[in-house]
Structures are given as C-alpha cells and as structure tokens.
Amino acid sequence: MADEETELSEKQKKEIAKWFLLNSPSGEIQYVAKDVRSVLKDDNAYNLAASEAFPIYNKTHMICLEMPGRLGDVLITSFAELDENEYLDPRTAQVAMVNHIKQICTEVRPASDEELPSAYIEEFRCALDAEVLKYVSEAYPKGVCSVYCTSGKDVEGPGSDFELVVVISATRLSPQNFCNGSWRSTWHIEFKDELQVVEVRGKMQVVAHYFEEGNVQLDANHECSDSTIFQSPDDIAMTIANIICHHETEYLTTLQESYSNLPDNTFKDLRRKLPVTRTLFPWQNTMQFSLTRDITKELGIGK
Amino acid sequence: MEAALGLMRRIHPKHSETALSALLSLLPEHSSDLLSQVDQPLQVLCDIDTGKEFILCESPWSNKYHPPLEDGPTPSSELRKLEIEANDIFAIYRDQYYEGGISSVYMWEDDNEGFVGCFLIKKDGSKLAHGRRGYLEEGAWEAIHVIEVGPEEEGMAHYCLTSTVMLSLTTNEESAGTFTLSGSIRRQMSMDLSVAEGHLCNMGKMIEEMEGKMRNSLDQVYFGKTKEMVCTLRPPAELVQMRLPDK
C-alpha cells in the first residue's frame, strides 16, 4: 500500500484536513483540530482548511458563544448570519463579531434598522421569543434559543406572508467522562396571511458520542409538521410554543422507546445474548459435530 | 501516531474507512502501525470452487496472512486440519448465536513455536437480510477475534485473545424518525489453560465469553451512556408534561 509513495499536494492535504474538521462530533472540533494539525505537518494547508471548515461546522452545530458585556449568548446559525463573521442576536438587537476558529465572540455592535425586522414583525417575533425562552428554560438545563425572521422582515402590517424560525440548541460536553452530545431543533413557522393559517415544520436532531475505550455514536433525527390558525402575536406565540413543546416531548418519549427496545428486540437481530439452544455452546462436546462431518464426508453427501 | 488514533476515536464509525485511508496517505511511514491498530470492515468473497461465502481478512493481517496471496504462509497439514475443524464448528456456533451471518477461521504458525487463529463473523441483521425479527432498517455486526496460542508446556498453553466488534443499527419509523447507533470497541483477554480438551475448545470458550461480555458492554455501557446523554440534554421532566395544553 505504501510502495508508491507520492507526496500529497497542499490542496489534497487541505481537503483531508477539512474533511476531518467537518466530521468532528459535536463539541469536539478543537480536539480534532489539534490532532489534524499534528498529522498534517503542514500549517499552511491546515490554516486554509480551518478557515473553510470552522464557519460551516459552527453553523451546522449551532454553537453558542458568549457576547462580551453580559449581553448573554448568541447562536451561530445560518439564519443569524449577516456576514461570514457577523451574527445577529435578535433578542438584544446586537450583532456579534465572531472568530470562528477560536470559537469566540470578540465584540458586539448594535444592529442597524435595516438588519432588524419591522415593528409589525418584531411584535410577533418578540412574543414568540418570550414564550419559547420560557419553555426552553424549563425543558433544557442548558438550552439556548433564538427566533429569527427569515422572510418578510419588512412587512409593515397585515396582508403579507412572513416566516419566523425558532432554533433551540443544547450541548453537553463532558470530555472527562468521554461523553459529548447535542440536541438541535429548528422550527419553521410560516404565517400565511391570506389563508389565515400558520404552518409549523420542525426538525430535531440528537447526537451523542461516548468514547471511553471505544467509539460509539448515536444519531437520531425526526421531522414533523403541524398547523394552527392566525392569531394575535401573544396568542399565536403561546400556541406555537405549546406545539413545539408537544412535539419535542413526544419525540423524547419515542427516543426512550427506541432505547428500551434495544436489548430484547433490535439488538437481538444482530446477535443473541444466548444461543437458540439457550445454553452455552458445547465446546467440550464438539466431537459430535466432527463425527457428523466425518460421516457425511465418508458417505459422500453434503456439499 | 497518537494523534491519528485520537482522530479514529472521534470520527464517526460510519466514516472509519475514509478516515483510515486519509491517514494512510498522510502518514505512509506509519501504515503498518495504523493497519494493525485500526480495524476495517470485513469483506465477503465467494469461493469459486465450493460456492461458499467466506470473509476476507484485510486488517491487520492483510499483508501477511491473507490466503489468496501466492507467497502467503499456509498452515502445516496438522494446523490445516484444525483450521478445517474450527471452520465447521465455528459455523455452528455462529448459527446458534447469530441466526445467520457468515464466519471464517484462519490459522497460521507464528515465529514463537505457537500459532495464531483468526475467527471472523459478519452478520447483516437488516430486515432484508438475516434480521429474523425485522426490526432493523440497517444492521451490521462484525467481530474479529485474533487469538495467539503459545507453545505447549507441561500440558498447558498461553492464550491471548484480542477481539474487536464493530456494529451499526438503524431503525426508521415514520413516527419516530431515524435512530442509529454505531460504534466499535476492542478488548483483550489472556489465559493459561490445559490443552487436555484441545485448543479449539479453549479458544471457543474464550471467544464465546468475550463476545458475550462485549455485547453486554455495548448494550449496557455504551448505548446506556448515549441514552444518559440524551436525558441530560433534555430531561424527561414531569413538569414539562404538566404544562402540556389540551392538545
């Protein structure tokens, strides 16, 4: 395999490094980065890879960064992205400047009027944010959430459609226990003015990694949808928060069921705990099997 | 090398082949170390003469002991006899525990007057293959047991077993979404045993015990830890349930 060694080009090294970085489990990219750097032995290629991979990783993993000045946390998501290094925090109406590779927020500036939704939209967004925040703080010990307007942010009043997106992200890192995990959910809420309905589409993604003397990972995801009628900002906020709570609670229950089906159903299709005979294999009596084989051979039967 | 193994411990098991070949291209000088310490998925081939399926053993023994190699060592006639017997008996063992699947056993003499046995099992437990109960959308179990047997001394022999299990299982139901658990673990066990009952009996018992322990540990510890993590992220709190509206 190593007979014809050809030196990899810088571009190939960069691609390999980027692949490893993008495939880092939740919360582990910095560890992966350290190892990748040391196997790559090429800082140029590494730096190129890191500058491309970190922003993508940070957004897909919806990482949460602390803003300076006790402003709270900002979520790094594609919905919040104004610029590659600028992310809007709608709750505080601040824009966070982000260093992707260090995974820190370096400074903040107030968002401009053009970057924020109209007063009409903001009323819906703000009410929903308050309800979701209440739900998340009760349901997730370390959950962070944000509500964005992803279309129709300049709508001034009734008569037009718009869309809000709720993002919930909870990460638990416990490297000393060799265990990390994250729960991410994204809820698209379409306000359809003409039909006077609100369509809700949710996607939940749960991952966990346990790696003490091994490497075992859980990947679970689920999509669902629901709808309700158009109501006043406060009423619709409460209804939507309840819809989200209902679906997420239900999903958690099905996850637990998947786990409880493992030992006796699912796992059994891979390997049984005990043989079909329900007793340990008779290794000391394998002569009987050998005899059978000899006989079949002698009689010229069998395969 | 340490960093390479660190990466293999983090990268998702479904990507382990890609990760390994990337590392091999970056670290050609460590290729034999990498191949011996990282297990790759087992490959199945069909024997043209007998029409039987067998498992090709790629890592960590590919270079040396792979049977199709022209210059690969072939076991002595005595060991070959044991190899044939082991294949037959192990197939019965495999059928009793796996209700399907494929197994292959390879043996060869080593440099220390002993020999090595390599016991391989591959099972596709998906509902379209050998999944008897039909629960799995996708399900793969691969076990590699390499057992080094030392020379016989006063009726005793030293056995050193290294086992790897790689598995992945996916269930997919409309109401529950996709649920996948995958991973690999490796364990070692050494024993000094009387050869009175024969090597095959000793090796078989050790493998059976090891597989049982590993299955249990995957089920209870590894899967259990990921479940614990889910419940830490979003505890199944009664409080939240009570807040549920009439919906």
Image (cartoon, rainbow, N blue to C red):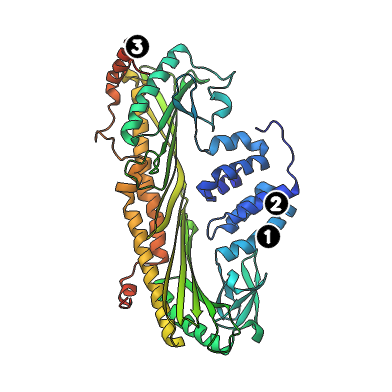
- Which residue is pictured at 32% across the width and 52% down the height? A261
- Density class for disc 1 (Cα within 10 Å; few <14, some 14-19, many ≥20) is some
Give the crowd class for mark 3: few <14, some 14-19, many >=20 residues within 10 Å: few
Q: Amino acid at mark 1?
A: Glu
Disc 2 sits on a residue from what chain?
A
Q: Is residue A162 above or below residue B233?
A: below
Reading the image, the residue beneath label 3 is A300
| Quarter of the image with the N terminus of chain B in it | top right
Q: How far from the left and from the top, in percent, is residue B159?
A: 41, 27
Q: Tell us which disc is closer to us: 3 or 1.
A: 3
- Which corner quadrant of the image does residue B149 belong to? top left
* Residue corresponding to mark 1: A52
Q: Residue at x 56, y 55 (%)?
A: A24
On residue A14, the disc is 2
CB atoms at circles 3 and 2 under 8 Å apart?
no
Do tag 2 and tag 1 residues touch (Cβ < 8 Å)? Answer: yes
Between A205 and B22, which is closer to the camera in this rendering? A205
Q: Position of residue A281 (x, y in %)?
A: 29, 30
Q: Helix, strand or loop at disc 3? A: loop
Q: CA distance from mark 3 to mark 1?
A: 66 Å
